[in-house]
Amino acid sequence: MVCRFEDLRCKEIINIRTGCKLGYPDDVEFESCTAKIIKLIVCGRPRFFGILGREDDIVIPWCDIEIIGEDTILVTCDFPVRGKKHGFVKSFIK
């Protein structure tokens, strides 16, 4: 399958371990020598309409991408549970 970056930007990234929607790819990082993509980057959400800056970016290594489908990109990342910061559910396990 041949895919342009413009096509990737329209695909929602979902973590299959937690079922959380991470967002849409905003940028890619690639190795200049081999021209291989090594990371997908989802920019952090703006805080208070951008006045207070942005949250941390979500960086997804290429090796964590399981499948790129028609509408979604399924990944298996081990992100910590952060509550509201990235839309993850808070953990109530003590």
Image (tube, grey):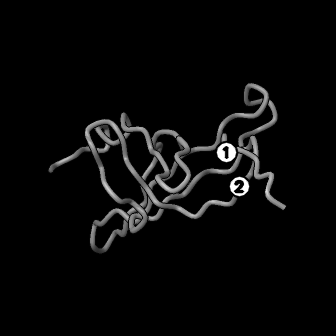
Q: Residue 19 carries which label?
A: none
Q: Which residue in the structure is indicated by mark 1?
A: 88
Q: Say what amino acid the circle numbered 1 marks.
A: Phe
x%, y% of residue 83? 76, 46
Secondary structure beneath label 1: loop
The extreme front residue here reads 93
Contact (CB < 8 A) between labels 1 and 2?
yes
User: Which residue sits at x=39%, y=64%?
Assistant: 62
Q: Nearer the viewer, residue 18 or 14?
A: 18
Q: Which residue in the structure is indicated by mark 2?
A: 81
The extreme right residue here reads 94
Earlier sequence position, callout 1 versus callout 2: 2
User: Which residue sits at x=37%, y=38%?
Assistant: 11
Q: In this view, does 90 lie to the left or right of 2?
A: right
The extreme bottom residue here reads 33
Q: Which of 89 and 36 is in front in this view?
A: 89
User: Which residue sits at x=49%, y=51%?
Assistant: 15
Q: Quadrant of residue 4?
A: top left
